[in-house]
Image (cartoon, coloured by chain):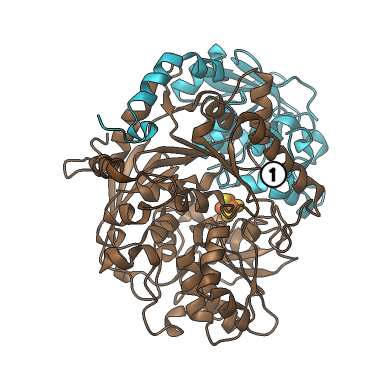
Chain colours: A brown, B cyan
Amino acid sequence: MSAGTLYDKVWELHRVADLPGGATQLFIGLHLIHEVTSPQAFAALNDLGLTVRHPERTVATVDHIVPTTSQARPFADPLAEAMLATLEGNCARHGITLHGLGSGRQGIVHVIAPELGLTQPGMTVACGDSHTSTHGAFGAIAFGIGTSQVRDVLASQSLAMGKLKVRRIRVDGALQSGVYAKDLVLHVIRTLGVKGGVGYAYEFAGPAIEALSMEERMTLCNMAIEGGARCGYVNPDAVTFAYLKGRPHAPTGDAWERAVAWWSSLASGPEASFDDEVVFDAATIAPTITWGITPGQAIGVDETVPTLEQTESDERPIAEEAYRYMDLRPGAPIEGLPVDVCFIGSCTNGRLSDLRAAADVARGRRVAAGIKAFVVPGSEQVAAEAEAEGLDAVFRAAGFEWREPGCSMCLAMNPDRLEGRQISASSSNRNFKGRQGSATGRTLLMSPAMVAAAAVSGHVADVRRLVAAPTTPEPETASTRA
Amino acid sequence: MSATPFPAGPIQRCEGRAVVVPGDDIDTDRIIPARYLKCVTFDGLAEGVFADDRSERAGDHPFDRAENQGAAILVVNRNFGCGSSREHAPQALMRWGLRAVIGESFAEIFFGNCLALGIPCLSADHDAVLALQAAIAAHPGAVLQLDLEPPLVRLVAGSEVLEWPLSLPAGPRRMLVSGEWNGTAQLVAHDGELRATASRLPYLTGFAAA
Ligand code: SF4
């Protein structure tokens, strides 16, 4: 059993009671809501005659269903309009802050909470969305919940949960230039499997993790859930504090000093023990890309699609299904595979540093003929910062479309979707069958720089050959990394 | 649409015909494609269940076959319900008429979402699940009897009775059998404990000086 880890400490601090079913009632420090999984929860709350216990610890935005071309109201899609109107009504009725379209603070829920300083170390964070694991980048215990649990958190600011085991994923060495947190996490999932993390929280640690910026740590923790781990986290450190300082919801003055002291005390200490540990070497990781229909079906860009003989026997049925669905031959190289659509965005990779890395590849190049390429900033704030540095102009000049913030083609709940058998190079997090809106559409997951490389090449390409120089440093790490 | 009422109160057993959806890693995007998430109530989700798989198989999907209509128990393989946390998936299955799931293993969030609806997800090892699936195929229309205490499933086909032990962790089992699976009231009742917890969290008091 783990002891002395950040997970153990935060769990104990938030333990409300032990429930008769054997679960623990856990206090939730920050509850994020959006238009897709909250309406039924509010309806259930009303049915029970209950109110929102902590409206001030509940924060809403709209992301999944918003169009990324014109965001004028009412939306062309009446269902999308009804969902947003329902959220607006519920937030107004219960006194919940909604960061709506045009507020300057709207965006994908997992992008805005960190950038507003809402997500902080030592918190428990819950949201009706599985990629809530993103917030673990701050040393928070953050996990996705279902609609019934959204109702429970609205009503009681707590939920019933079983404690997870803790696996430390220690990453030694340093990532090569052109290799990003996305490649690292795809490599981890490829190695441990999409079910490898079931029942675990993943603690990401070691020199390669400490060297990551906050935005990269968010990418990493975002995809912990794709490896089966309901939450993933990084211990808070100077990089975390530098990112948080000065954000709208961050503590100030003396309170800031006390906060940093408390946050620091929560990190897993040298005496911490884990249920399991796995060690990786960052230097050996290549730009990594999925070839199949689960995020675990990933290979280095310089590798070939695994054959059945190279596949564990229990993974063979899904490998065969993937060959058929993706129309890929076992043993074929992935580099050079033509793509139709290139999508840069999502809560995994829709932040400023992601757009910078992609713009570095796009700068001075052109999107290949016949390819639709588009960039969707993760939030209004990301869009404003990117535009201030002229990244929108770089992308437009290269032939990319520059869109309004939202979840976009990460999933098919808005007008952005694949058509028919189209194949996309995508910086999002899921390559499940039909995920991007066409029941036969195909998805290759990769880093934003790799998506840009595919866009300008017309096919899957090794970004290391396009970007010789190291990428520009990221905003919040410029001072802390020096 | 389901003929039987939705789960309520203590859940000790479940009886009905079975529908088998074979395959590992069936994710919630397949159970209910994202386009069906555009709704403000769960009513009407039944029609979207496995929609893409069903149109791909043009009437030959287990959920479309005549003998499976009205089934109450879903039998699956490994890691069922992985992917998106959407509760629309168990909601869609429940509204189609299902009241229990048997499989080799389940994704954690899916398991919890089912529990919150009063739908038990019971597991058995690989060989037992394959044997159960084969027995169902050999006896179309046979009724399964599912017990939670102890967890087991029985297939009754004429004079033949086949039985497999199942497993269900003690906590969820107690919650289902006692009727405490819908626990909102219980959480809310711990008002004093909730206050005590909130008062020791420095971020809720603005990191005020001690
Ligand atoms: S970007 Fe994709 S994964 Fe992230 S919250 Fe939106 S739909 Fe979910």
Q: Residue at x 67, y 43 (%)?
A: B31
Image vertical order of residue A426 relative to residue A25, above or below: below
Please state if A20 lies on the left or on the right of A439 as rendered.
left
Residue projecting furthest to the front: A253
Q: Nearer the viewer, residue A274 or A71?
A: A71
Looking at the image, residue B18 sits to the left or right of residue B47; the answer is left
Q: Mark 1 lies on which chain?
A: B
Q: In which quarter of the image is the C terminus of chain A?
A: bottom left
Residue A329 is situated, as x and y percent measured from the top left of the image, at: 58, 72
Pick the quarter of the image with the N terminus of chain A: top left
Decide: is B17 above or below A405.
above
The residue at 45%/32% (across/down) is A28
Q: Is residue B106 visible to us here?
A: no
Q: Which residue is drawn at 39% across and 75% down?
A: A472
Q: What element carries label 1?
A: loop
Residue B68 seen:
yes
* Residue pointed to by mark 1: B32
Nearest the eye: B84 or A72: A72
Residue farthest left in this picture: A271
The type of residue carrying mark 1 is: Ile
Residue plotted at (33% across, 74% down): A176
Q: In this view, does A243 lie to the left or right of A384?
A: left
